[in-house]
Amino acid sequence: MLYLSAADVERAIGEDHAIFVEALEAALRAQAAGDVVQPLKPYLRRPERPHPTDRIIAMPAYVGGDVRLSGMKWIGSAHDNQRTRGLPRASAVIVLNDADSAYPLALMDGSVVSAWRTAAVSALACRFLAPAGRRLAVLGTGLLARTHLSLLRASWGRPDGVDVYDIAPGHGEAFARWAEEKHDLTVTVHDDPAACLRDADVVLAVTTAPESWIPAEWVPRGSLFLNISLADPMPDVVLTSDKIVVDCYEQVMRPGKLLHSMAEQGTFGPNRCHADLSDLVTGSRPGRETPEETIFFNPVGQAIGDIACAAAVYRRALGQGVGIHLER
Ligand SMILES: NC(=O)c1ccc[n+]([C@@H]2O[C@H](COP(=O)([O-])OP(=O)(O)OC[C@H]3O[C@@H](n4cnc5c(N)ncnc54)[C@H](O)[C@@H]3O)[C@@H](O)[C@H]2O)c1
């Protein structure tokens, strides 16, 4: 069994983060063809840690097509890791299993793969749903904001402008310094979240806020809203959108998710959901059709994406001789 640490995963990928978009696309095509198995994820939560992002999630899947591997991501999260422990919010391991023997082939750090997989989902969404303009507003400037800016810049295009807002003092400024050094991008840091969104073509919500707080009146008409976090947008953001696209309807409708709670209140249902991301990739449903459309995209994370991305890393690491072979 090949073991890949986070550093090994980074070494195998280098700067070629586009492999995650390709791997994700392969997984979504396999999904559209009915060639995946993806059980609903169990959430391990403890009553004494009620924050919505405090949990460990088991995400098993089989992905067919060219990927042809099974596996599972086991991802833990604590919203206060950085502030109280000096650790990143999320940690994960991924196990890849042979599709036929079911034997484990690889064990790798999953936090790097997970962060890039999530950005790859948004990069694909931008391909089909973003308007022509490229002004990006980012709410929350943690790890996900960084992988998103990097991958959107590489696969969607260099933003015309980047506006950010973060509730924690200094986080927005640190992100701006990183974006300048890493990507030669000038970032405007806002104290007022409404001002941050005012001119946005694409809004990226990646905070750890426990409750919804962004009203529809802040969201520009004709924009694409990428709701990656658990909360952030208020229900009226969904209600005033012309199209609602998700990664997987079945997973989005789990208790605790925004669209599920709206369905409980009778304000959301399957007829309001325009498409799954796999429908856009295969062309069975259209993406953006007019510049005026306001589009809401809500991915909650699919294991098939993690397994396909981890498979791409594993195959690349094998080819490069990266990692350590462990005896069973
Ligand atoms: N949909 C998916 O597939 C998926 C996958 C991975 C992570 N996520 C979600 O993405 C979010 C971000 O993850 P991360 O790893 O970047 O977290 P992080 O802890 O690294 O960063 C979160 C940032 O949000 C800021 N923040 C918190 N509350 C805020 C508020 N009310 N307004 C503005 N900023 C606020 C924090 O100060 C911090 O800088 C989490 O909610 C996580 O659950 C979703």
Image (spheres, rainbow, N blue to C red):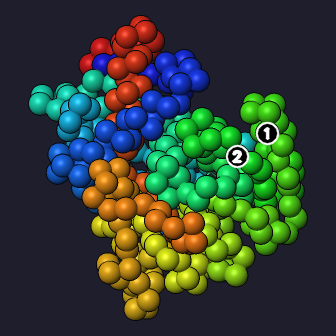
Q: In the rendering, at what x and y percent does residue 56 appear?
A: 45, 53
What residue is rendered at 46% in x and 73% in y?
A: 243
Q: Quadrant of the N terminus?
A: top left
Q: In the rendering, at what x and y percent does residue 177 appear?
A: 84, 39
Give the camera-side residue of 35 and 74.
Answer: 35
Q: Which mark is residue 41?
A: none
What residue is rendered at 41% in x and 25% in y?
A: 313
Residue position marked by numbered label 1 in the rendering: 185
Q: Residues within 10 Å of mark 2 (few under 14, many from 20)?
A: some
Q: In the rendering, at what x and y percent does residue 263 appear?
A: 39, 84
Helix, strand or loop under label 2:
loop
- Do callouts 1 and 2 mark residues in contact (Cβ within 8 Å)? yes
Q: Residue furthest top?
A: 321
Q: Earlier in the sequence, mark 1 or mark 2?
A: 2
Q: Which mark is residue 159?
A: 2
Residue type indicated by callout 1: Leu
Say if residue 206 shows up in the picture. Answer: no
Q: In the rendering, at what x and y percent does residue 146 appear?
A: 67, 42
Residue 45 sits above or below residue 57 on the image: below
Q: Quadrant of residue 229?
A: bottom right
Residue type indicated by callout 2: Pro
